Amino acid sequence: MSDRTTLSHHRGFVRFWAADTVSLAGTHVTALALKAVAVLTLGATAVGTGMLEAARWLPYLLFGLVAGALVDRRRRLPVLVGADVARAVVLALVPLTASTGTLTMPLLLALVLVFGTLSLFHDAAHQSFLPVLVPVERLTDANARLEQTRAAAQGLGPLAGGALVKVIGGPLAVLVDAVSYLVSGLVLVTLRRAERPVEPPPKRDLRGEVREGLRWVYRHEVLRPLAFASHAWFLFTSMVIGIYSVLVLDELGFDAFLFGVTFAAGGLGGLLGASLSGPAGRRFGVGPVIVAARWLTPVGYALVPLATSGTGGFVLLCAAQFVFYLSATLDGPVEMGYRQSITPDRLLGRMNATMRSVNRGMIVFGALLGGALADRLGSRTALWLAVAGLVGQAAWISTTAVRKARL
């Protein structure tokens, strides 16, 4: 492989990767900080944390398909920059309202809802912009680099977030993320990469454009079962996520820093998974790697309801997060590379938004369902139900055309 084919040769990708790294670092500080604010400062129950998780992803359910069509109508870089700057402003309102004593759970939910809407447009443009920066044969490797950064942020971000919450409190910890989005936007402004001009159709038909994206995903031999299995995966994993913070911080009594340590263990698993994803995809094929990763998820999350308040329980929580993030990042790069490589450029925004919006819609339902089941049946029973669902989606995807997918 010559130097001219390495990712470092693609300067636009390097800047894109740098911007992504900065914003992701702040994102995972805030992911923990918002949960800590909800539970420790505002006294939220499992239902409250489920609502917070749902508010983050509700825009994907409500506007996701439209967002994909709108992103496909224009250049994607300005969308990325605008979304980063706007998200910085929205998150800065959390410490501002906290300092004035006006931060409440409804206000926090509203701010997270606006933040989620901006993230929806950013994500649709983000996943569709990568094929502009690198050739198709480098897409899996490029996605793996982004996934490695995401895994590191998932591990170190909550660890730093836990420490920041302990030292300066949750609201100020959110300010770190606001700054990171601003820096990310400024880095993207310096990116000089010519995008293909978007050819407007003779007549704008938003409904028709949305239907075209839906047809591409749900009539494709591999994308269709992959989409349905992914929807189920997000539903059941979000049930666990909605319960996890209450179980660890409230029922088991671990503090915010140790809560963050469990995610740091997850980050190590994520780094390992992202590092193995590309080589495993080339060695075994995209489909077998995706299927194997889908089986790893319930293996990891089955450890969560077994945890107790002692040292052994804490080790189980760390192991659960390690295996879960290993499974997610082993899957992510090969799946995304496959989806990007088989989808025409004019449909990329709609394909990504269709998959992502329905997946995020499942997070809304799963977070609320997990919180309701936990309050009614207990946390551990609700967790076992989620694990059973994850076993079901893994068993089903193993029988579909996904297992034969190749780049």
Image (cartoon, grey):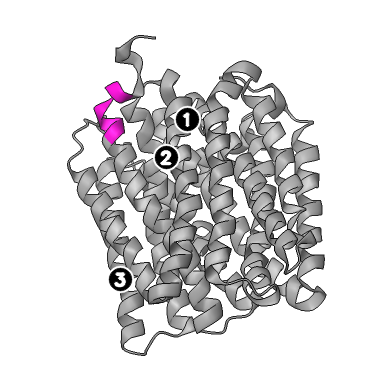
Left or right: residue 308 compared with residue 330: right
Residue 340 is marked as 1
The reply to whether residue 221 is in sight is no
Residue occupying the point 70% across, 72% down: 252
369 and 292: which is toward the camera: 292
Residue type indicated by callout 3: Ala
Residue 92 is marked as 3
- Magenta stretch encompasses residue 32: no
Residue occupying the point 64% across, 58% down: 238
- Magenta stretch encompasses residue 10: yes
Q: Quadrant of residue 11?
A: top left
Secondary structure mostly taken by the magenta-highlighted segment of the chain: helix
**Disc 3 or disc 2, which is closer to the eye?**
3
Q: Residue furthest bottom?
A: 101
- Tell which circle, 1 or 2, labels the residue nearer the N-terminal end: 2
Q: Is residue 192 above or below residue 267?
A: above
CA gap between label 1 and label 2 equals 8 Å
